[in-house]
Image (tube, rainbow, N blue to C red):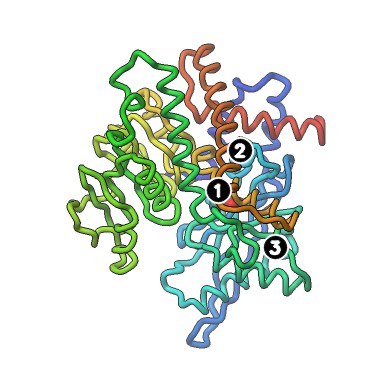
Amino acid sequence: MSDPYESALNFLDSIRDNLPEDYRPYLQRLQQPQNLVQGDLEVKMDDGSMQKFRAYRFQHNNALGPYKGGIRFHKQVSESEVKALGLWMALKTSIAGIPYGGGKGGVVIDPAQLSQKELENVSRAYMRLVAQHIGPDRDIPAPDVNTDSQVMAWMLDEYEKILKHHAPAVITGKPIELGGSAGRTKATGYGGVLALHFLKKACADAYPDNTNGWYHKKRADITIAVQGFGNVGYYFAQTAASEGYRVVAVSDSKGGIYAENGLDPQAVLQSKEKNGSVTAYTVGSAIITNEELLKLNVDIIVPSALEGAIHADNADHIQAPVIIEMANGPITSEADDILSKKDMLTVPDIFANAGGVIVSYLEWVQNRTGLYWKEHEVDQKLEELMQKAFDVMWGKHLELKDSQGSATLRMAAYVLAVERIIKAEMLRRPL
Ligand code: GLU
C-alpha cells in the first residue's frame, strides 16, 4: 500500500485549481506540519520486566484553534500513519465548523496482548510523554482505534497529577463521571447515520426522476453492509437498524455475517462479547469474509475499520452505489480514482465520521462552562452541526459539478475545509 501521509498530501495538492487564486500559495502551509512529539514509552509489565513502545503525538495545523484528535493503540501505527490521520483531523474539524485544528496520537502496540494493568501503565506513560505539549487551549486528545473512555480516564488522571489541578477539558471521550458528555460513545456511528439521512434526502431532491435510485426507496428496503464492528461500526449498524434501514451484513477482523432480511446489531454484539467475533452469531445468517462483504450487491457499504480497506485490487468489484467512509482513510487514492470514474457516491471520512469530534467539542464546551446537557440536547446540537456541514458540502458539490461536469463529495469537502483554514492563516500570518 502507498505511504498514507504521501497520499494524503497528494490529494491535498489535487484541489489546488479549485481554490481561489490568492489562496493557492498558502496550500504549502498545510503541507508542512507544525510539530511531531515522539519517544519510547518505558512500561512495566506484569512479569516485572520493562518494555519499550514507540509513541507519537502529531500536531498538524492550529490556525482555527487548538489541535484536536484521538490516540490510537495499534501495531500498525507509524509516523506516516499518525501524520496522515492528523492532517485529516485538521480538515475534519474545519468542515465540521468547530474551533479546532488537527492532530493525532498513537502507540505501536497490540492492546489485545496486554492486561488491564499494563494498558493503564501504557496510558499513563503516554501522558507523561505528551503532557507538556497538550492542554485545553493547546491540544486536546480523545479516543481512537482501541482506546476508550477508561484509557481517557487514566490519561486525564496522570495529566492532573502532573499539573496538580483539575483540567477535564484537556481530553475528551471521558467517562461521564469524570466530565464526559452524554451521547459521546455513540456519537461517531450516530453521526454517520445522520449523514445517511441527509444524503438520501439531498439525492431524492436532486434526482426526482431517477425512480430506480436507492434514495427513492423506503428505509426498510435500503440494504447496508458495515465492515468493522468496533465502537464506530457497531453504533452505525445499531443506529441505522433502529432508524429502520436494513443492515444485512457486518464484520470484524475475524470475518463477517450476512442475512438478507437484516440483522439485529445489538444481538450480534452480545454474541461477539461472549464469543469473540460476530461470526459466532448464527441466527439466520451465513458467514462471509471481509472481502465478500465489500463486494455485496447492497445499496450502501460502510467501511468502519482501518485505512486502505478498499484498494486498487478490489475497487473494481464494488457494486454498492454509495460508500460511507466511517473509518479514516478506508479508500486508497488509487481506489478512489477507480470509484469516481464509476459514478459512485462516496461520503468522505472527514465529514461522515465527524460526529465523534463534534461531540468531543460539545464535551469540551461543557467542561469549560461547568454546565452539562442531557443526551437529547447533545444529539440535537450534533444534528444541527452535521446538517450545516452537509448543506455547505452538498452545495459546493453541485457548484463544482455544474462548472466542471463532475466532482466528488470528497473534493467539495476538501475545498471547503482548506479554504477555511487558509482564511485563518491569511488573517494570522499573511504571506
Ligand atoms: N478519533 C476520532 C476521529 O478520528 C475522534 C477525535 C476526537 O474526538 O478528537 O475523528
Q: Secondary structure at mark 2?
A: helix
Q: Position of residue 1 (x, y in %)?
A: 41, 45
Q: Is residue 306 left or right of residue 280?
A: right
- Where is mark 3, residue-wise? 168
Q: Which residue is mark 2?
A: 96
Residue 89 horizontal side relative to residue 342, left or right: right
Mark 2 or 3, nearer chain start: 2
Looking at the image, is 117 positioned above or below residue 156?
A: below
Pick whichever of labels 1 and 3 is earlier in the sequence. 3
Closer to the camera in the image, 418 or 236: 236
What kind of element bears circle 1?
A: helix
Q: Residue at x 68, y 20 (%)?
A: 20
Q: CA distance from mark 1 to mark 2?
A: 20 Å
What is the three-letter code of the residue carrying label 2? Ala
**Of residues 404 and 338, the one drawn nearer to the viewer in this rendering:** 404
| Vertical arrangement, residue 380 with respect to residue 149, above or below | above
Q: Is residue 159 left or right of residue 323?
A: right
N-terminal of the pair, mark 1 or mark 2, is 2
Which mark is on residue 1? none
Please give the residue where the numbered disc 1 appears in the rendered image: 376
Q: Residues within 10 Å of mark 2 (few under 14, many from 20)?
A: many
